[in-house]
Image (cartoon, rainbow, N blue to C red):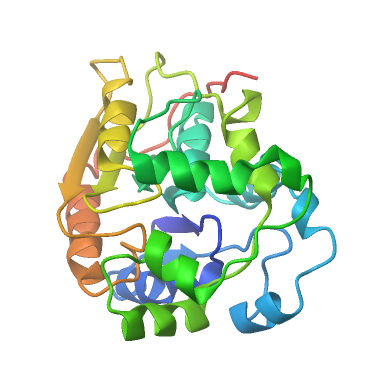
Amino acid sequence: MKTIVFVHGMFQNPKSWENWVRFFSERGYDCRAPAWPLHEGDPKTLRHSPPAGLGELSLDEIYNSIEADVAMLDQPIVIGHSVGGLIAQKLLARGVVSGAVGIASVAPNAMLDFDWGFIKNSAIITNPLKGDEPVYMDAKTFHGAFANTLSEDQATAAFEQTATHDSRNVLRDCMGKSGRVDLDRSHAPLLLIAAEEDEIIPADLCEKNFNAYEDADSVTDFRRFVGRSHFICGEPGWEEVATFVAQWLEQNGREISPAPQASTLR
């Protein structure tokens, strides 16, 4: 039985993967969805009582926690959303997973895009004047930036069920040394998925990330889904995305096997 590790992104926790865990468990996978440090529990409770130290949480702390979970498994597949997608790419470069899927993934190596939504939302999150104050997600911002393709009622329900507050330092770190990946190395199969209406990670940036991988002998694939927001893994129609991922995993089954150890850039 092949194991899948699902890695959530900012402003979410394992609650956001419940449908995907059920979907892939029904297809015979052993599914795990670990929480980032300070992200364990009910999202509503986490919003009402933010954990002490949340604003100081770093990307390295998150990555080390996920890597420790992965190290206890036999070359699992990793599927990550947003920052979780960057973590998936870092794990792939280390050679500790047998395949990776990055969905609306933060791009490595400080790749940028001039899309207005990307610039605006990135600036709000990383604002240096806010220091280590957490980013407090609210229903209006969640709808406008995170789940912009949903109706107001749908977005409000998704916010109540899945949204958390988060650390500015995580995205800041993504833009620095901790967010670097060696894109020249050979690697196990990688699929990058973009959401056409994403206001946080533009589809063009996902494609730029895909095109930056240079090893022609490694499986690297890209798929753009129209009419989807950054909440692509939870919005109506998520089943189409999950089905595409499942089919991709089946098609690349022979290549999804233990890979040689490699290293991310530090």
Inspect this view and state whether residue 119 appears: yes
State how many labels appear. 0
Q: Quadrant of residue 226?
A: bottom left
Residue 123 location in percent, x, y? 55, 41
Residue 176 location in percent, x, y? 62, 26
Residue 40 location in percent, x, y? 68, 71
Q: Residue furthest right?
A: 52
Q: Is residue 187 above or below residue 3?
A: above
- The N terminus: image quadrant: bottom left
User: Foreground residue, 94 or 173?
Assistant: 173
Name the side, left or right, on which 152 lies relative to 70: left
Residue under the image location 30 percent in, 15 percent down:
215
- The C terminus: image quadrant: top right
Q: Quadrant of residue 169?
A: top right
Residue under the image location 39 percent in, 56 percent down:
2
User: Foreground residue, 99 or 103?
Assistant: 103
User: Foreground residue, 243 or 57?
Assistant: 57
Name the side, left or right, on which 196 lies relative to 229: left
Residue 39 location in percent, x, y? 67, 66
Inspect this view and state whether residue 105 appears: no
Residue under the image location 79 percent in, 68 percent down:
51
User: Foreground residue, 156 or 239?
Assistant: 156
